[in-house]
Amino acid sequence: METVDKARIHATERELVPRLFVRAMFGMVMICLTMVAIYRWMDGPVQYTAPEAPVVIEKTLFLEGAMSGAAKVFAEDGTLIAEYSPEEGGFLSGMWRVLQRERTKARVDLDGPVIVRARENNRLEIFDPSTGWGADLMGFGADNSAAFARLLN
């Protein structure tokens, strides 16, 4: 019995991916890029942003985090609201790191407050007044959003 050392491919190297498919994929990418470029060139509005709704609850908080995942949250007057272990505070600590990066880029004080808002449409958001950066927390999942919701109570 004879052993075969080569893989059993019945097509030549040129035919593994037909040239027509490669051209079609390249064409689709170019069409998408062209459509986006034209839309942005015509000043098309940004869509699929969170809908605006009245603010129900708003708190000014100070976040303090660590690379281990531990986090502390302080009220405006400096009292400790919550302290999380590395297992519990991962998302809060992650947000603290994002804030540190944004504040470093903007060259503002790293220890400034953040505003956490609950809106009428059940959406939570975090906003940094020193940089203008903000995020809709719904996009991070229910558990992570709930970590900030508990701070508003």
Image (cartoon, rainbow, N blue to C red):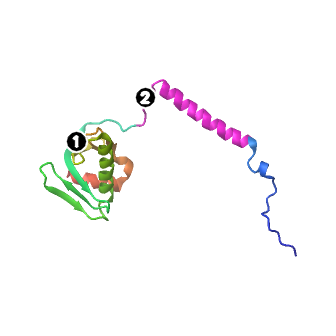
Q: Is residue 70 visible?
A: yes
Does residue 66 lie above or below 62 as drawn? below
Specify whether 122 is left or right of 29: left
Residue at 81% across, 52% down: 12
Rendered position, 141 above or below 47: below
Mark yes or no: residue 123 visible: no
Image spot of residue 5 (x, y percent)? 80, 68
Farthest-out residue, front: 107
CA neighbours of label 2 inside 10 A, class few (<14), some (14 to 19), many (20+):
few
Name the mark nearer the viewer: 1 or 2.
Answer: 2
Between disc 1 and disc 2, whose residue precedes?
Answer: 2
Q: Which mark is residue 56?
A: 1
Q: Residue at x 29, y 36 (%)?
A: 53
Q: Kindly identify the amino acid type of the residue bearing the numbered disc 1.
A: Val
Horizontally, residue 77 falls left or right of residue 83, namely: left
Labels 1 and 2 touching (C-beta < 8 A): no
Q: Is residue 44 above or below residue 84?
A: above
Q: CA distance from mark 1 to mark 2?
A: 27 Å
Q: Which quadrant would residue 19 be assigned to in this image? A: top right
